[in-house]
Image: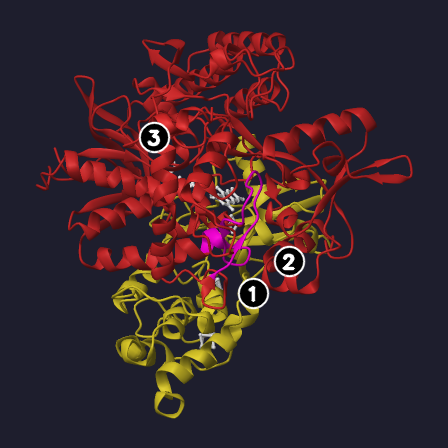
Amino acid sequence: MQIRLDILRRKSAIDSPYIQSIDFAYEDKGESVATALTKINRSGTVSPISWECSCLQKKCGACAMVIGGVPRLACDAKLCEFEKAGFVRVEPLKKFPVIADLTVDRSAMYDALREIRLWLEKGLAPNEGSLDTAYEASRCLQCGCCLEVCPNFYVGGRFYGMAAGVPMSKLLAQLDKADRQRLAKEYSRHFYAGCGKSLACKSICPAGIETDALMVNSNAAAVFKRLFG
Amino acid sequence: MSRVVIIGAGLSGLTAAVTFAQAGRASLLVSMQPSERAQSVLAEGGINAALDTMGENDTPAEHFADTMRGGVYLADENAVEDLTENAPETVRWLSSLGVPFNMQAGHLIQRNFGGQKKKRTAFAKSSTGKMIMTSLIDEARKYEAAGLIKRYPHHEFIRLLTDGGRCSGALVRDRYTGLCAGIDGVVLLACGGLNGMFPGMTTGTTQNTGDAAAAAFVQGVELSNLEMLQYHPTTVGIPGKRCLVTEAARGEGGRLFIMRGEDRYYFMEDRHPELKNLSPRDVVAREMFFVRRELGGEVYLDMTGLDSEVWKTKLPDLREELISFLALDPKESPIPVREGIHYFMGGIRCDRYHRTSMSGLYAAGECTSLYHGANRLGGNSMLGAVYGGKAAALDILRRFPDSSEGGEIRFEEAAGEFCEPADEGLIMQISGILLKGLGIVRNEQVLDSCIGELDVLSRARQYNAREGARLSLARAMLISAKERRESRGAHYREDFPERNDKLRLEGVVTSSGGQITHRFEELPEGKEENADQA
Ligand SMILES: Cc1cc2nc3c(=O)[nH]c(=O)nc-3n(C[C@H](O)[C@H](O)[C@H](O)COP(=O)(O)OP(=O)(O)OC[C@H]3O[C@@H](n4cnc5c(N)ncnc54)[C@H](O)[C@@H]3O)c2cc1C
Ligand code: SF4
Ligand code: SF4
Ligand code: FES
């Protein structure tokens, strides 16, 4: 099977972008955009394409990029999905500053979590009641796909998007009422106030995180706290 | 010299950074990519500690005994004793950081895991590593904000800075700008396993290229037990890697079989009646190799007998993964499995305090050869990584108490040794040779021919420093396997199929001026009461 990858490349942030078309032959239905990038780089036929990957099995979020117009993980984007069209466009995530080719600087996501002081001030006693929510929220890959599709998120804004909303929901679920006040305020200000609840983030999340359910929990814990205690 | 530079932000490096910060000491945390991307997030099955929550009278002494037996007595007993004694406290600490370990009636649930006679493995559904990492990252963030942890999260360790044979810091490159900085300080290598020596053939990450250990090796740091590669018996091939089917699948009742004529032959149950499908990994992997050689065809893992509750509460990710990558639902049909390289028991040689052979240099986590001897038990490596990171940090705090700042860190244009990447073609050639020599079943003839091939390759052209280091490390791995003329744990020699207790010795390799030497060293003496168990 044969496919053409149209890759949006640029040498660095200050160089101008261009599309490079590369024909790629593959045999296995399991081969993904990540496989193609690995093999193309290994073949040495084009100058090395800058991109990031680590686990190759949808578990680390490193390889998020825009594929066929949709933000997703390169290791999960099977080439055969694009067989009909015969080509697939591969671009970097657009909401973050580009470093080179498909590599972007996602440090804004980490800065946001530090900004809202997402951590425990003291040790927790294990609590069976919050396990499922804590588990679901801890699965966030910090890949940034949700931010890419979110109509309300931009780097530098006060709304931090679902990539912050999900991790916040872990601690909001685990902390008891007295201890979650500070985080509840941050949640209201940096998430609740800005979220339009369109849930574009839910269908795009490559980890399949139930962002809506987590949001309901967090809203109950942080925003409607007088009602739910 | 008292700044602390940690290379690697997986379980081990993160725990070290948090331990320093708790003591009020600042550290720099250098990693190729952020912690969320480290191999540690892939760990599934769980982490071991004799918490004794299952009413089986489990004790650290039994955890010690199982670990030593699993490693076929090749680990430092003192270190293993530290590890197993401190395991309960380690897991309780993780739990207090908010790790959502599975619970029941107010206590953590522990499950069976290969090579252990008691339920000792705490877990968080099928993503234990990810769950622990998320909580540790939260904890580290607190200290980042306080200025006690400074991250360099897109930075590659290039080589050690040395000063008269001792380590005085690390040369680090910003992968985004290409600029380098020499950072002075005590260095802790927590750079993970040697996956990059076998691209595409391991269950781990592409980030752990092996370059860090290779550079340290040619700079004079001793490595040991490099022949000890753990093949995980149940992996499935997906493009670019081997994908692990966690041992928990067998812990929960999964059974291995191969077709013999018309019938399913449950060979593990037949040939290893005591531990059956949960025998140590090397035993299972080798048995699979032999049974395939005998009967032909593939080995299958049958999980169709597991009940829905188990899939839902204990193995949800595994099922989703298999459906997505193999288009097979393990709830409905058995899946074909093969062995894949999963863990590196060998690595940087260090003592129970995590000091390496080079003064000023420490190592912790999967990059070391410390805790697991000739074979690692499932659930012991996360423990080794977390506890090891902490133990290393505590020793550095004791021995390098001066916390003055260190020189300015300036990133600048710096070409030169080790900066240039290794040629991809060469990496694959070396890996091809290693795979031939270091398979599940080895013999001297094949190893000799592999060493010969590597020699030819080494002389074929000029290599840059990184390529040279990789060639040296590869050679050291093959020599280690050749010199151990016995079978022990993960190392199985067809020509020496028995264990030889005269070789209950650590196989140490050194590199000096391009010369690689191998020697056997006595293991440190353990406490007397442990001696008769060997
Ligand atoms: C699929 C899978 C399942 C597993 N399941 C279990 C389990 O159930 N139980 C268990 O106990 N163990 C399990 N393990 C093993 C365990 O996860 C690892 O041994 C452990 O997490 C290693 O932690 P670490 O901190 O040593 O290394 P890693 O998590 O690998 O981290 C290494 C760090 O070093 C950095 N690094 C590497 N090279 C460089 C360089 N040159 N410059 C800068 N940084 C560098 C990386 O970026 C990374 O941050 C599993 C492993 C795999 C692959
Ligand atoms: S619900 Fe909509 S606005 Fe809110 S985080 Fe998701 S995509 Fe953004
Ligand atoms: S919520 Fe989903 S899409 Fe958003 S960062 Fe986390 S894993 Fe990625
Ligand atoms: S490489 Fe880890 S998610 Fe794709």
Q: Residue furthest right?
A: B262
In the figure, the yellow chain has which letter? A
**Which residue position holds label 2?**
B320
Quadrant where the N terminus of chain A sits is: top right
Check residue A208 in the rendering and tell me which mark sits there, or answer none.
1
- Type of amino acid under label 3: Asn
Q: Nearer the viewer, residue B378 or B474?
A: B378
Classify B294 as above or below B60: above
First of labels 3, 2 by sequence position: 3
Q: CA distance from mark 3 to mark 1?
A: 44 Å
Q: CA distance from mark 3 to mark 2?
A: 41 Å
> Does the magenta segment cover residue B111?
yes
| Tag 3 and tag 2 share a subunit | yes
Check if mark 2's residue and mark 1's residue have beta carbons within 8 Å.
yes
Q: Residue at x 17, y 40 (%)?
A: B397
Magenta range is B108-130
Eye-nearest disc, 2 or 1: 2
Q: Is residue B463 left or right of residue B433?
A: left
Eye-nearest disc, 3 or 2: 3
User: Crowding near pointer 3: few (<14 within 10 Å), some, many (20+)?
Assistant: some
- Type of amino acid under label 2: Glu
| Tag 3 and tag 1 share a subunit | no
Tell me the colour chain B is drawn in.
Answer: red
Classify B12 as above or below B218: below
Q: Nearer the viewer, residue B95 or A13?
A: B95
Observer able to see residue B413: no
**Which residue position holds label 3?**
B78
